[in-house]
C-alpha cells in the first residue's frame, strides 16, 4: 500500500482528500503545515506529498525547497487557487511535479495522484534486485539513461534527476529529432489531460536542461522549435542496448 501525505492547514480540505484517496486503497497521513510534513517525511516512507501552498508556520514553497535541497525526490503535487498563476510557476520552479487548482475535482485528484505514483515507482523507487540483471540503456551522445537502475550519466558523471525528469528524458531519447508540442509532451509523460500544460512542461524542460546541458542557455540536446514545441537532437543515433552487468 502506498503512503500519501496530505499537508494542508484546512481540516475540511484534508478530510475531503482523505475520503477520495482512501477509496483508492492509499494509506493517508496528514500534516497541518510544512514543518510537520518535513518531520513526517523523515520518519515515514512517503510515496507522494499532496500539499497546499498557503499555510502557516512553513508554507508550501519553502517546504518544497527544503525537501529538494535535502535530495528528496518524492512526487509533490501542489494545491493552488485558480487565480494564483504566480504561485504555480514558483511551485514548479521549486521542484513540484504537478499542481491541482482549487476547487478541485475528485476524479482529477485521483488521476493525477495515480499518474505521479506510477512514475515514481517506475523511475524513483527502490532499485533493489537489479544487480546482476540485464539493463536497458539509452544513449545519445554523452548522455546515458539506464532504465532498470533509473540512473543517468553525462560524460560518465552521474546526473540526479527527479522521476518526472527521468520520464521526460526517456521520452525524448526514445523519440529523437521529432518535434512535440507541450500538449503532446504532457500527454505522453504526465499521462493526463494537457489543460494548462504549457507552463508545467516549460519549467520541467528548463530544469532538465540545467542538469544535462553543458550550457543550458545554448542547449546541444533539448532544442526549441519556435511555434511548434521541443525536440531532442540526435548526436548519435540512440539505441536500446541490452547488456549483462557483472
Image (tube, rainbow, N blue to C red):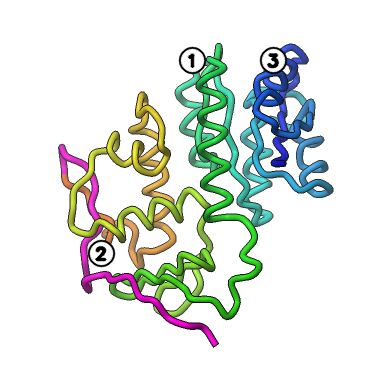
Horizontal relation, residue 78 to residue 144: left or right: right
Horizontal relation, residue 152 to residue 217: left or right: right
Coordinates of residue 82 in the picture (x, y in percent) = 49, 15
Residue corresponding to mark 3? 16
Residue corresponding to mark 2? 220
Instruction: Point out the tag, 3 or 1, that comes first from the N-terminus.
Output: 3
Dot 2 alpha-carbon crowd within 10 angstroms: few under 14, some 14 to 19, many 20 or more:
some
Residue at 23%, 59% in the rendered image: 176
Residue corresponding to mark 1? 82
Coordinates of residue 16 in the picture (x, y in percent) = 69, 15
Q: Would you say residue 30 sits in the magenta stretch?
A: no
Tag 3 secondary structure: helix
Quarter residue 133 falls in: bottom right
Q: Nearer the viewer, residue 93 or 72?
A: 72
Dot 3 alpha-carbon crowd within 10 angstroms: few under 14, some 14 to 19, many 20 or more:
few
Q: Nearer the viewer, residue 119 or 140?
A: 119
Q: Is residue 82 above or below residue 78?
A: above
How far apart, in angstroms, are the residues tagged by discs 3 and 2? 46 Å
Instruction: Point out the tag, 3 or 2, that comes first from the N-terminus.
Output: 3
Provide the residue span drawn in magenta: 226-246
Dot 1 alpha-carbon crowd within 10 angstroms: few under 14, some 14 to 19, many 20 or more:
few
How far apart, in angstroms, are the residues tagged by discs 3 and 1? 18 Å
Q: Is residue 245 above or below residue 236?
A: below
- Tag on residue 161? none
Mark 3 against mark 2, which lies toward the viewer? 3
Residue at 70%, 33% in the rendered image: 26
Coordinates of residue 73 in the picture (x, y in percent) = 61, 51
How far apart, in angstroms, are the residues tagged by discs 1 and 2? 36 Å
Residue at 16%, 42% in the rendered image: 226
Instruction: Point out the tag, 1 or 2, that comes first from the N-terminus.
Output: 1
Amino acid at each position: 500500500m502506498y503512503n500519501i501525505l496530505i499537508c494542508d492547514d484546512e481540516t475540511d480540505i484534508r478530510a475531503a482528500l482523505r475520503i477520495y484517496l482512501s477509496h483508492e486503497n492509499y494509506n493517508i497521513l496528514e500534516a497541518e503545515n510544512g514543518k510537520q510534513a518535513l518531520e513526517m517525511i523523515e520518519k515515514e516512507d512517503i510515496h507522494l506529498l499532496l500539499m497546499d501552498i498557503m499555510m502557516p508556520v512553513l508554507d508550501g514553497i519553502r517546504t518544497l525547497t527544503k525537501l529538494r535541497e535535502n535530495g528528496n525526490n518524492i512526487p509533490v503535487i501542489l494545491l493552488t487557487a485558480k487565480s494564483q498563476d504566480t504561485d504555480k510557476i514558483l511551485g514548479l520552479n521549486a521542484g513540484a511535479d504537478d499542481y491541482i487548482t482549487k476547487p478541485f475535482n475528485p476524479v482529477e485528484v485521483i488521476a493525477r495522484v495515480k499518474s505521479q505514483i506510477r512514475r515514481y515507482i517506475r523511475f524513483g523507487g527502490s532499485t533493489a534486485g537489479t544487480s546482476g540483471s540485464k539493463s536497458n540503456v539509452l544513449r545519445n551522445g554523452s548522455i546515458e539513461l539506464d532504465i532498470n537502475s533509473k540512473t543517468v550519466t553525462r560524460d560518465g558523471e552521474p546526473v540526479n534527476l527527479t522521476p518526472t525528469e527521468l520520464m521526460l528524458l526517456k521520452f525524448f531519447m526514445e523519440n529523437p529529432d521529432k518535434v512535440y508540442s507541450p500538449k503532446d509532451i504532457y500527454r505522453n509523460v504526465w499521462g493526463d489531460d494537457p489543460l494548462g500544460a504549457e507552463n508545467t512542461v516549460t519549467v520541467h524542460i528548463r530544469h532538465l536542461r540545467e542538469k544535462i546541458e553543458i550550457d543550458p542557455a545554448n542547449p546541444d540536446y533539448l532544442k526549441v522549435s519556435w511555434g511548434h514545441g521541443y525536440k531532442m537532437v540526435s548526436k548519435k543515433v540512440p539505441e536500446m542496448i541490452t547488456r549483462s552487468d557483472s
